[in-house]
Amino acid sequence: MSKLTTNQIRELARKIVGARPGGIRYSELVQEIVGQTPETPVNTIHGSTWDLATRFPAEIIKPSRGLFQPASAQTTPPAAVSVVEPEIEAGFSETDFYEPFAEWLKNDLDEVTVVSSLGGAGLKTKWGTPDVVGVYKPTASNLIKFPLEIVSAEIKISPQAPVVAFGQAVAYRLFSTKSYVVMPSSLSEEDLSRLESLCMLFGIGLVIFDLDLKKPGFTIRVRAQRYIPDMFYVNEFADRLRQHNSEVFEHLFA
């Protein structure tokens, strides 16, 4: 095969990515093109393929750094989308505590300037959707401005779910400056001790509360540490949120 032009390289790359529903790493894609057209300079291939997701957004997506995937692989028929049902414990639903915690996070803990409850599978990602997400950002009265911070929280009302909650809270650190696990006080002492130790090791915040809608009594056990999130995933989260609920996006980030 003779040396390919830029457009021909891109057409070949589109075919290769389209045939890999599980995705293909950028370096692997380049090597496959080199293998099919060794006469084409590698630098020309790099210059023609690095921005495939930007040039062909309807066909190719970039779900993580250095990975190209056909957009069709992310399209799930509505009937096949699994919706996470809220937990029910002692007559309460998990969603009953979203708004009370959101208000506590803003007014009592003073960790955020604006806050909203999300929860469920609204953003349709296997990495989950925070039950509560808030943003700490400068106000007009702040003389010194600072970068905004995203604070996420995962709330569980079942004392049997500490590992699941912790795992989700860790995942939220991809796009969050701070992340919290919120668990009921009915958690066993052993589980509470282990969860508290894990939170301290990984910088995750831990809050416990009573299953009482009138007086949940949120109590901080471990204050979340501040981390610099990966801006790739920050923008991915913001884009998914804007598409899912533009009003919440504007409320948090405008």
Image: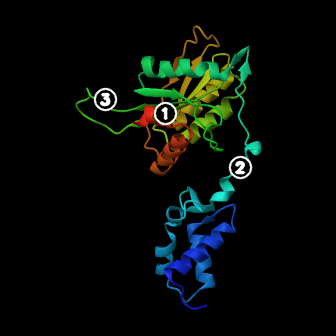
Query: Picture quarter containing residue 1?
Result: bottom right
- The answer to which of 76 and 181 lies nearer the viewer is 76
Of callouts 3 and 1, which one flags the residue occurring earlier in the amino acid sequence?
Answer: 3
Point out residue 239 in the picture as x, y percentages from the top left corner.
51, 46
Residue 76 circle label: 2
- Residue lying at the far left in this picture: please name it: 143
Point out residue 32 in the picture as x, y percentages from the top left corner.
62, 77
Tell me which amino acid carries mark 3: Thr
Tell me which amino acid carries mark 2: Thr
Point out residue 81 in the picture as x, y percentages from the top left corner.
73, 43
- The answer to which of 116 and 204 lies nearer the viewer is 116
Residue pictured at 68% horizontal, 57% vertical:
73
Residue located beneath label 1 in the image:
247
Badge nearest the viewer, 2 or 1: 1
Of callouts 2 and 3, which one flags the residue occurring earlier in the amino acid sequence?
Answer: 2
Residue located beneath label 3 in the image:
139
Of callouts 2 and 1, which one flags the residue occurring earlier in the amino acid sequence?
Answer: 2
Compared across the picture, whether 217 is left or right of 79 comes to left
Residue 29 circle label: none
Q: Quadrant of the C terminus?
A: top left
Alpha carbons under labels 3 and 1: distance apart = 20 Å
Alpha carbons under labels 2 and 3: distance apart = 41 Å
Mark 1, secondary structure of its residue: helix
Alpha carbons under labels 2 and 1: distance apart = 25 Å
Query: Picture quarter containing residue 119?
Result: top right
Compared across the picture, whether 150 is left or right of 8 comes to left
Instruction: Give the vertical position of 94 relative to 150 (above or below).
Output: above
- The answer to which of 66 and 114 lies nearer the viewer is 114
Label 2–label 3 contact, CB within 8 A: no
